[in-house]
Image (cartoon, helix red, strand yellow):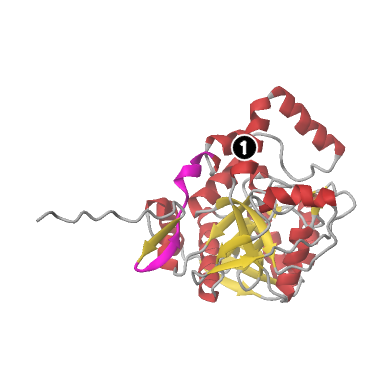
């Protein structure tokens, strides 16, 4: 008798079954548009940081594109090939603020906070997040943080957060800032620290001195890091993991980082690219769901297509593995010049 040959079922590149549960894994077929991929490296070499709404910055970008046209081609390829992630928003204070955040537009046209965002897709268990050779740097730095006696805690009160922030800036050894620049940054962040939807976390040394700070808006299924700063290498890894543990325990699926300009992670400096890649962040276009609707014009529909490709209706796999068809909301709360009122707050 012949033996029946078993042909394994091919699974999508970005899904994997582990212990009967579908897990997210990076799609190797899109390696060129991932962190450190050729398209990402070429596009991120363009001057894409925040402030492109100013004529001088925009002219600088145009001049760089003329000198290096292949980088513009890489940016276009990246925009077209990057996956779109539909993120659900609730009607909580954090969800309403995130609705406003995702509705801001660059030059009144392009969605300012949706393209090429740095997104960490969280698994069900923290052990799953720590598993694998790609997390070796994370495990190593967490062991060092534990050996150094670094501890993390949540804090309340904008004054405590501002004092911790000032001390961290004072102890920083990189990117030296003048006292006036530090005062300006702390004043802008103090307004952020006082918001009711913001959660504040601090990493401290054994003596209680602050080493790192993070300010994040946490909704039911998504968290956005608005501001982060650190004066110690191990402390920033410990504080980020402290946040990840908290989010996984709450069932949050998406962790995003604010900043970088209208092209998201492409505007971050190389050291932050490297740090985020080691933590498992991926590049995603983001579409908010359940946001407040607005009266869309034809020009808005044109640029919204960039982050809703390939269709208006999105089949989304939710956290429980169910397929849900949704119609993304599209809020519009842009400034006159399309710039965000929030500071570019990712300093670590």
Quadrant for the N terminus in the image: bottom left
Q: Quadrant of residue 140?
A: bottom left
Residue 256 in picture, x, y percent from top left: 62, 59
Q: Looking at this view, is 329 or 152 the one in front?
A: 329
Residue 87 in picture, x, y percent from top left: 63, 63
Q: Quadrant of residue 68?
A: top right
Query: Image point 67% across, 53% down: which residue?
Result: 308
Residue 347 in picture, x, y percent from top left: 66, 52
Residue sticking out furthest to the front: 1
Residue 227 visible to the viewer: no
Q: Looking at this view, is 343 or 304 the one in front?
A: 304
Query: Image point 65% across, 56% down: which residue?
Result: 286
Please, is residue 306 above or below residue 92 in the view? above
Residue 16 visible to the viewer: yes
For label 1, the SS is helix
Please, is residue 64 above or below residue 260 in the view? above
Q: Which residue is mark 1?
A: 77
Question: Is 24 within the magenta?
Answer: yes
Q: Give the residues drawn in magenta, as a range.
A: 19-32
Question: Is 197 within the magenta?
Answer: no
Q: Looking at this view, is 89 or 119 the one in front?
A: 89
Query: Image point 28% across, 53% down: which residue?
Result: 7
Q: Looking at this view, is 195 or 19 the one in front?
A: 19
Q: Is residue 99 left or right of residue 41?
A: right
Q: Quadrant of residue 224?
A: bottom right
Please, is residue 268 above or below residue 184 in the view? above
Q: Count of labels shown? A: 1
Q: Is residue 97 left or right of residue 133?
A: right
């Amino acid at each position: 008798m012949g033996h029946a040959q078993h042909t394994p079922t091919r699974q999508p590149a970005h899904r994997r079954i582990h212990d009967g549960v579908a897990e997210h894994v990076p799609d190797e077929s899109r390696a060129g548009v991932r962190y450190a991929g050729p398209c990402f490296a070429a596009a991120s070499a363009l001057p894409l940081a925040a402030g492109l709404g100013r004529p001088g910055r925009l002219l600088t970008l145009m001049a760089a594109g003329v000198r290096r046209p292949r980088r513009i081609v890489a940016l276009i390829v990246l925009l077209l090939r990057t996956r779109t992630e539909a993120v659900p928003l609730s009607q909580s204070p954090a969800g309403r603020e995130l609705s406003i955040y995702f509705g801001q537009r660059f030059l009144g046209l392009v969605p300012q906070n949706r393209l090429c965002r740095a997104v960490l897709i969280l698994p069900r268990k923290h052990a799953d997040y720590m598993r694998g050779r790609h997390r070796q740097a994370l495990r190593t730095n967490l062991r060092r943080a534990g050996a150094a006696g670094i501890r993390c805690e949540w804090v309340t009160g904008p004054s405590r957060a501002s004092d911790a922030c000032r001390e961290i800036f004072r102890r920083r050894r990189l990117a030296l800032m003048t006292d006036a620049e530090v005062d300006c940054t702390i004043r802008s962040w103090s307004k952020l620290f006082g918001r009711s939807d913001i959660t504040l976390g601090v990493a401290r040394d054994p003596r209680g001195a602050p080493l790192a700070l993070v300010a994040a808006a946490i909704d039911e299924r998504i968290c956005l890091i608005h501001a982060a700063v650190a004066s110690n290498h191990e402390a920033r890894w410990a504080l980020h993991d402290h946040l990840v543990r908290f989010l996984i325990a709450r069932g949050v699926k998406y962790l995003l980082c604010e900043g970088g300009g209208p092209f998201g992670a492409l505007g971050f400096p190389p050291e932050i690219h490297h740090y985020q890649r080691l933590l498992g962040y991926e590049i995603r276009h983001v579409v908010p769901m359940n946001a407040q609707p607005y009266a869309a014009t034809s020009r808005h529909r044109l640029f919204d297509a960039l982050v809703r490709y390939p269709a208006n209706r999105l089949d989304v796999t939710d956290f429980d593995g169910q397929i849900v068809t949704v119609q993304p909301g599209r809020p519009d709360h842009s400034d006159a010049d399309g710039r965000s009122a929030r500071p570019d707050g990712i300093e670590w």
